[in-house]
Each structure stands twice: as C-alpha cells, then as structure tokens.
Image: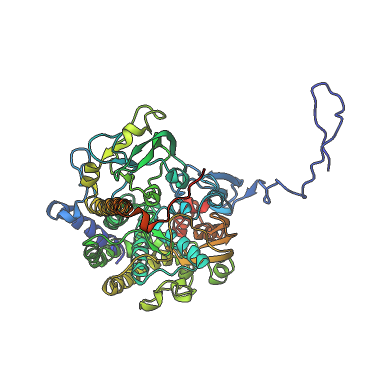
Amino acid sequence: MSSTILTDKGETPVASVDISAPEGAGQPNYTLTPRTSSTGGIESELLEVAMGPQHPSTHGVFRMDVVLDGERIVKLKPVFGYLHRNHEKIAENTTYLASMPYTDRLDYFCSLTNNWAYALAVEKLAGLQPPERAEYIRVITAELTRLVNHTALIGFLLQDMGASGTPLMYAFREREKILDLFESLTGARMMCNYMRFGGCRCDLPAGWLDETKQVVAAFPQFLDEYDRLLSENEILIARTQGVGILPHELAINASITGPMLRASGVNYDIRKVDKYGIYDRFSFRVPLGEHGDVYDRYMIRLLEMHESLKILEQALKDIPSGPIMDPKAKIRGFRPKTGEAYGRIEGPKGELGFYLISDGSPNPYRYRVRPPSLINLTILEDMCLGQTVADVVVILGSVDIVLGEVDR
Amino acid sequence: MLGEGIIKGLAETAKNFVGSYVDGERLTTVQYPEERIAAKEAARNFPFLVFDGSDPHAGLRCVACQICEKECPPKCIYITKSKDKKPDYIGKPQFYPAVFDIDISVCMSCQICVEVCPFEAIKMDNEFELSNTDRFGGLLLDKNQLAKSNDFYRKIHPTEAAEVDARLAAEKEKAEAKAKADAEAKARAAAAKAAAPSVTKPAPLQTT
C-alpha cells in the first residue's frame, strides 16, 4: 500500500512514502452502524465514551475507552501509561540501594511490601540472610500493610458504589492508626523506605510492640463494625452479587494473582506456596471465594484482614531479640556477584515480583517489576462485557489498582 | 425483611455519630493549624547539616566527601569542595564544603544521605511547613540555611543524637589517646636517642 504526499504546488512528489500496515490496522473492530435496540423499535447506535483519565472513579490517571449500546458495555479498552515514570530504567542506572526509595512509590499504599519484595530479590542475588528478628519485623510490617491496603480498598470500593464518605472515612480512621505506627518506626507514613538488603534499617523504637499489640487487639472490633455497616446492605448486595464475574479458568489463564484470584476460588497464596521469609511458622487460613463476583472480592478482603490479624498476633508474641542486620551486608559499595534472581511475595494486591540480573557492577544490569495491579487489570474487559456503565466503576474498584504500580 | 441490612448499617452510623460526642476514640480529627500533634521522634522530612558548638562555619561536620551527592537517588545535593582545610572535631585538618545546596523541591526524603554519611554530618529534620512563594530559589537551600546546631538535633531526635554523640566522643577519645600515645612514643624514642645514641645506633657514615 502506498500513499502520495500532497504538496501545495500540485507537483508530483519525488519520493512516495510506503506505509505498509496490516489490513484493518487503526480501524475499530466494531461498527458504528444504526441498529434497532432490543427494547423496541427505537433506532439507536453505539456510543464511544472515554471514561477518564480525570474520571473520579478511575483510582488515578487511567482511561477506559468504552463502547456502549444503550447502557451496556460492548467493548472496553483500558488505556494506561499516564503516570509512567521510567522506574525500571532509572533503577538500571543507579545503585541497588538507591532504587529502594523508588519502590515505595510503586504501590504507594503498600510501600513496606514493595520494599520487602525488592530486598528479597537482592538478598537472593547477593546471598544475604536476614536475622531472625528482622524476619519477624518484616512479617509484622507486611501484615500491617495488608490491613492498610484492604481497609483503604474496601472504603474506596464502597465510595465507588455511592456510599460516599462514611465508609471511606471510617476506613481511613483505622488506617491512620497503623500509619502512625509506621511513622514512629520508619519516620514516614507512606514512603517508608525501611527494609535494607540483609535486614531492616533501624530497630523497633521503645514501646512500639505494645502500641502495635493494642492496635491489633482493637482491630477486629472495627472489622465487625464494618461488617454490620454494609455487608448485609441490600443495595450493596444488589450492586455487587453476580456483577463482574471472573471464572476461575479465565483467572488462571490470565495469570491473575492475589485476592482477585482467590475470590474466583483458586487456592493460591504465595505465603503458603512459596513460604518466603518465615511464613511457614504461622498458622493461618486462606479464604476462598465461590462465585468470583465483586461481592466475593469484597468479602475476601474482609476475611483476609482477619487472617492477617491472626498472623500479627502470633508474630508479636514470638518476636525474638537480637540483631536486625546480616553482618555481611554493607551500605556503601554494594556489588552483588554476577547472576540473576527473582524475588516474589504475596503483596496485598497479588504476586509482586522483582527480577534482577547482576553483572557485578554497582547497578543492576536488568531490573524488572512484576506488578500485580497491571496484570490483574488486563482482564478488565472480560469482566465488564454486558454490564452497565455503573457496574464498570464497581468492577474496576474491586480489581484494586494503584496507578503508580500499573504505569511504573 | 427487605431493608433490614440498611437499618443495621444506619444504626452503626448513628452509634458513631453519638459516640463521637462521648468517646474520644471516635473523634480523631485534629484541627491542624490551631492544634498540633507532637512530631514523632523518628519523623523525617528534609536533610540538614549538623554543626558542633556555636559557629556554623567552624563547627560544620561535613568534610565535602561528596558520598551523599553520589548516592542521592534523585540527585538533589550539589557540593563544591573547598580549596583550603579547616580542623574537624578531632582537630584533624579536613576539607569543607564551599557550596552545599539541597533542592528540597526534588528531595524525596528517603534518608539515604544520612545512612551513607561516614561523618554524621547530615541528618533529617522534621520541619514540614516550608511553603514558599518562590518555587525555584526559595526551595533551593544553601549551606547557611541548612546548617543547624547539634543541640537542635538533640532536641528533635534525642535517642539517635545520644547514640551519635557517644560514638563521636568515643572516636575523639580514641584519636586523642592515639595522639597522646604517639607523642609519648616519640618523646620516649627521642629520650632514648638522647641518652645513648652511640650504643643503640651505629655511627652514621661519614661522607667526605
């Protein structure tokens, strides 16, 4: 296929540019033809709508190009990349340690689990082993992070459904208590930058364990309150049950992980499968959903918080004293030996992995993040087809995305 | 019964509403500019330079080694090394930063400069009310704006500062002891040399 360049003088251009493109490229694979709607003899046509990037329910700068037949979704195309910050390439051009604060900014709700996943990958690469106490601190902070993420998520999910304000503010009130704990431990509420290769940056401040025990002891009361507030609400049930169903075969094929996968009834939790860190020492159960709809995803998160509290109780009881850094670890001049490593953890949103290749220099040769939010988002269209516009907002909310991690 | 769940939820809201008048736990909002929560000891925001004593220039601990400049992830530190030297806290002559700027509009408060500094010269401040009408010059802090006394550091991070002070005091003591031992050894050697130069040492070769 060739096209001619139009010039002002009307001359024949010297060189014609050959733009060869596959047949149908750039063309939508649906037709905007007038058609008769199912409701009667009214002529209607498909409507293309761009939801986002400034739409209030998109959880960040994220666009969904939807094609609507009346109010039903015919096609949905997620468009992301608005928040791309070149994280992976920056990490390849800076030292291993200097990437640690950038991992905080991936999924900014769960900076401590991001830190852990990255530290785990580097520890595998460099052959470091965190001491016992550091492992316990990591479990405690990671489970607190899970509580932070899930409380915020269910607050936002209910906000998306129109329960504006109240549930979100209740969730934020509880989240604030945990963020206070993070601040007194790490110095920052959200950008914690706490874990280091071979341990943790600083030891627990005096009285921190007691404060945490109090927060953990008071948390089930909040969860029960939240349960009473909305779990039986008829409007919530009508809006969520049978909406956005993700069958478990599809979930496995699309490599969905985390609470979304478990809501579809697949028993896969990396804390159980991989037993990274010291998770084999704690007894906890993995809640599973049955239908894979939005309601199951909501309930899975509530139940997971109960299990996190169980882990926290055990960890807070058993935490030993001792050093918090591997003596082999060093802050300046860190050069792991040549090799590659993949470290993965069960983040609050799913499998969070870091893949690193070292060539023996102070910078990683290759640095790759496996972001759970992005991969869970790829299945959005399959869940939304045939649903209404209002349901799309709820389904997107139940996927639990953070655009910092999707776009990196 | 239809609507039972809604009523149950509303009862919960009502409980919170009424409870907020009785129970402080349920009323967590702090009216910020009027009321303030005391800063946590570990709280960090932007770095500052520590100086000992009362003179920010003479007491500045920074020796312009530029490690923090290299390790800073967003590269917000700018250092120019001095031409001459000044004595540090032990008394050893060291370079000092002729220019030390931190662009706090770029800084991401990660604390890596503090961790890599071998001289305990840069620490984290917990000041956060830094709004400025000049977004370029106003947020680029120079050496004089960054320099804060060790007393200030002790005030905002008491536990950490006590550890640092102890470590520096131990180093200084060690250095002083070493200097004293060196001086003594030198004096002894000199004395020995003066007492019996011909016995311990062969006579120096005479060149003609």
Q: Give the answer, above or below, for where A332 lies relative to B64.
A: below
Q: Give the answer, above or below, for where A258 lies relative to B193.
A: below
Tell me if residue B131 can be seen. Answer: no
> For the point 82% across and 21% down, which residue is it?
A9
Residue A321's spot in the image, x, y percent? 28, 70
Q: Quadrant of residue A220?
A: bottom left
Depth order, front residue of A316/A298: A316
Tell me if residue A7 can be seen. Answer: yes
Q: How is the image coloured?
A: rainbow
Looking at the image, which residue sits at the far top? A9
Residue B155's spot in the image, x, y percent? 20, 45
> For the point 55% across and 44% down, which residue is it?
A49
Depth order, front residue of A47/B176: B176
Residue A296's spot in the image, x, y percent? 42, 67
Looking at the image, which residue sits at the far front? B208
Depth order, front residue of B142/B29: B142
Depth order, front residue of A217/A355: A355
Residue B148's spot in the image, x, y percent? 27, 38
